[in-house]
Image: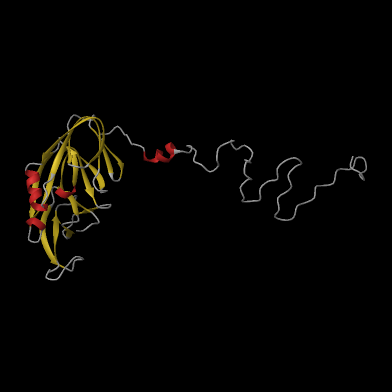
Amino acid sequence: QIPGQHPGQPAPPAPTPPYGQPAPAPYGQPAPAPYGQPAPFGQQPPGAPQGVPQGLPAAGAGLHAALQLYKETATGQRWTPQNKQLMRVDLTMGGAGVLARQGSMVMYQGKVDFGYKGAGFVGRVVGNATGQEMQLMRCTGRGQVFLAEEGSYLHPIELQGDAICVSAESVLAFDESLQYEVRRVEGHGIPGGALFTMQFQGTGTVVIKTHGTPVVLPVTPTTFADCNAVVAWSAASQVIVSSQVRLRRNAYPGHSGETVNLQFRGAPGNFIVVQPYEV
């Protein structure tokens, strides 16, 4: 019994703390931390696991957790983007090999054979246009090959009996099962005198590379594009060289500022792929 308290009288209420201050802790218990402040070092809130720092991801800490975001992606498909700039091809899926630009392999797993060779007619005409022969490597075997080139964005395009034209400079790799041929787009002002493209047709995948994220536009009667910005277009489109005079960023004294644009024509359903890049 508290001195001065009559029998049967309830105990007086605990004193109310000043406004905004936490209530005192029960006798023998640590005082709670002020609102918004962390608990004192060595003390964890009730129910918190002991020995585990707070605020860490549920997956845990350490090297494994930090690299988990970048682990290999396997989808069971032949072609699998690992990210926007890295492509994985599984040669165990399907029997045909893969043709890729020489030097585009960054890693491989399994037993993979690489056969380096010139691209034949493709290599010769591309060499005439750019001054550097296009070298292809043939990848065969059982394993996975990872492809990339100078941080370009990579886009797999699966063909199922249809056809597409791709600028030779924008081709990274393609299934050997695809039929391909070289086409020339000739015109005054084009570097080398012609723009060389590769037309792919059949069943398989071709991987194109772009500088930045491309845009796909429908072909209309007034569709023009810079010859350096065009990446690909539907094979049924008609391409016409059209020169227009304007001041280029890299124009120099004695240069007319002339640039070469390509005009595309075709029935509804035709398209072009343009990258946000210009030489």
If the image is split into quadrants, where does the N terminus sit?
top right
In this rendered view, identify the residue nearer to me: 62 or 197. 62
**In the rendered image, the vertical position of residue 16 relative to residue 87, given as above or below:** below
Residue 145 placement: quadrant: top left
User: Looking at the picture, does residue 149 appear above or below residue 59?
Assistant: below
Q: Is residue 270 visible?
A: no
Near-viewer residue (219 or 179): 179
Residue 206 position within the rendered picture, expressed as x and y whole percent measured from the top left: 19, 41
Asked whether residue 198 appears in the rendered view, the answer is yes
Q: Is residue 269 left or right of residue 124?
A: right
Task: Say which residue appears at 10% left-offset and 58% top-offset.
Answer: 191
Q: Where in the figure is residue 70, as x and y percent of width and height? A: 37, 40
Q: Residue at left 26%, top 40%?
A: 87
Residue positioned most to the bottom: 253
Q: Is residue 247 above or below residue 166?
A: below
Left or right placement of residue 109 versus residue 54 in this view: left
Percent from the top left, x then y, of residue 172?
20, 44
- Quadrant location of residue 110? top left
Q: Residue at x 19, y 51 (%)?
A: 231
